[in-house]
Structures are given as structure tokens and as C-alpha cells.
Image (cartoon, rainbow, N blue to C red):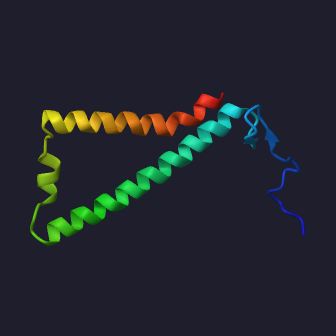
Amino acid sequence: MVDDNDTGKTPTSTATDEPQFLPHPLLDRLLDISTALGAELWAERERRMTLERLLEARGIISAADIEQYRPTENEAAMRRAGRDEFVRRIFEGLKTL
């Protein structure tokens, strides 16, 4: 059986022994980053939607409460630290270039 999507090319290896599927290793790393970001984003979005629905259904908070919330300075600092760790983890794949 012939695979119409088969280019006849096999992945090559870079100096890091990572398989290379695209013409340049940077493109492979960017694809890795995009895939990781997409997975993280959807997991977080799905979890947030569930929490919002449960909280609103139980009369604990409304969607407007969430939109109007402003974090304290301490919470903002914790969020920045979490964001920095997230960015480090997502872009870690670029270190091998």
C-alpha cells in the first residue's frame, strides 16, 4: 500500500541526537513549543471552565465576580513567579540549538 503522505524522507539527527523532521532544527523546536503550549492552554481552559460552571451553579461566585477580581500584591508576585517558570519550561527546547 502506498502512503500519499510519505515524502520518502526519514528524520535526521541533530548534534543533540534529537530526530529532525523539518528542514531546520529551529523549526522542530518551534513545533515542539507550539504543541506544548497548545496542550497546556487547552488543559487549563478546560479546567477553568469546569471550575467556573461549578462555582456559579452552586451560587458561590458569578462570571462577573471572576472578571472583576484584582489580585493582591502578594498574589500578583506569585503569579509572576509561576509565569516565569511556565515560560522557562515551554522555551526550554530552544536551549539545544
| In the image, residue 56 above or below residue 79 | below
| In the image, residue 35 above or below residue 52 | above
Horizontal side of residue 66 vs 51, given as left or right: left
Horizontal side of residue 86 vs 82, given as left or right: right
Residue 77, horizontal then vertical, whole percent: 23, 33
Q: Residue drawn 33% across and 61% down?
A: 47
Residue 44, horizontal then vertical, whole percent: 37, 54
Residue farthest bottom in this picture: 58
Horizontal side of residue 25 vs 41, given as left or right: right
Residue 62, horizontal then vertical, whole percent: 12, 60
Q: Residue drawn 17% across and 49% down?
A: 67
Residue 71, horizontal then vertical, whole percent: 15, 40
Q: Residue drawn 59% across and 36% down?
A: 93
Q: Which of 86 and 41 is in front in this view?
A: 86
Horizontal side of residue 3 vs 61, given as left or right: right
Residue 13, by quadrant, is: top right
Q: Residue drawn 29% across and 66% down?
A: 50
The image quadrant where one finds the C terminus is top right
